[in-house]
Amino acid sequence: MVSRNTSDSSETRANILDAGQRLMAGKGFSAVGLTELLGGIGVPKGSFYHYFASKEAFGEAMLDSYFDAYLAELDETLRRPGSTMAQRLLQYWQNWQDTQSFSDCQGRCLAVKLGAEVADLSEPMRMALKQGTAGITTRLARALETGAAEGSLSIEGEPAQVAESLYQLWLGASVMVKIVRSRQPFEAAMATTRLLLRLPG
């Protein structure tokens, strides 16, 4: 049986992670201080260090939590019944456009926002990003292999290489969307994706 104190402690930790994800997806990691992070959820600064040894350790935990949720959602999309793997993959990229845009992403664009910043700032956070994105491309590679086998899509080259190219394409498009304040880079990425997978426009 889980004690009330243990349950409250887990909930407080989760609240800190959720608040950080929302704030840092908008402002970046370095721009958000602990006062701002904790003030909105009513957690004393001293309590922060009960859960995290440092802001860097918090950032690593936040990225791990983000990717856990992201990968679970991706798994659900790629298992969707009643559709081909090509249709599931197109749904994934439609979901990407809906959650990674230049408008408020509610913390769901964390990898895009923090990737370049924290990769140079913190080795543990870089490794969390590397592990998380590897989880994405591994799943995409399996999906491409399945789609090719069932005949709903076609690729040239190894699935792992195509998956990495597609992820990098969409990551770059997400950055450009923020720069130009337009969804046009997503439209270009989708057109390129359809060409790579030999899907009708």
Image: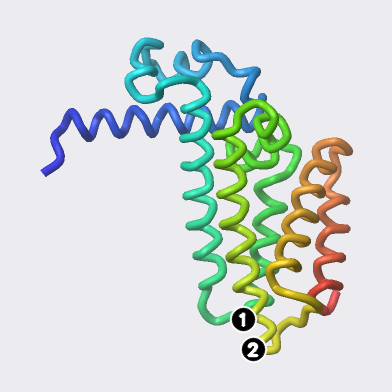
The quarter holding residue 197 reads bottom right
Mark 2: which secondary structure? helix
Image location of residue 22, percent across then percent down: 56, 31
Q: Nearer the viewer, residue 54 or 90?
A: 54
Which residue does the image show at 86% across and 51% down from the upper left?
Answer: 185
The residue singled out by tag 2 in the image is: 150
Marks 1/2: CA distance? 6 Å
Position of 81 compared to 201: left or right?
Answer: left
In the rendered image, the vertical position of residue 5 relative to residue 110, given as above or below = above
Q: Residue at x 56, y 49 (%)?
A: 131
- Residue 125 falls in which quadrant of the image? top right
Most extreme residue toward the left, as rendered?
1
Residue type pointed to by label 1: Thr
The quarter of the picture where the N terminus appears is top left
Residue 151, x across and y down, in percent: 70, 89
Give residue 52's position: percent from left, percent from top: 40, 24
Three-letter amino acid code at disc 2?
Glu
Question: How many numbered discs?
Answer: 2
User: Neighbour class for label 2 at 10 Å: few (<14), some, many (≥20)?
Assistant: few
Tell me the residue at 20%/32% (across/down): 6
Q: Is residue 7 left or right of residue 44?
A: left
Secondary structure beneath label 1:
helix
Of residues 103 and 10, the one nearer the viewer is 10
Give residue 177's position: percent from left, percent from top. 82, 43
In the drawing, what numbered circle is on residue 146? 1
Up/down of 111 relative to 138, above or below: above
Q: Is residue 92 left or right of residue 36?
A: right
Which quarter shows the C terminus?
bottom right
Q: Residues within 10 Å of mark 1 (few under 14, many from 20)?
A: some
Residue contact at pointers 1 and 2, CB within 8 angstroms: yes
Which residue lies at the image location 88% right of the left edge and 58% below the top edge?
188
Residue 199 appears in the figure: no
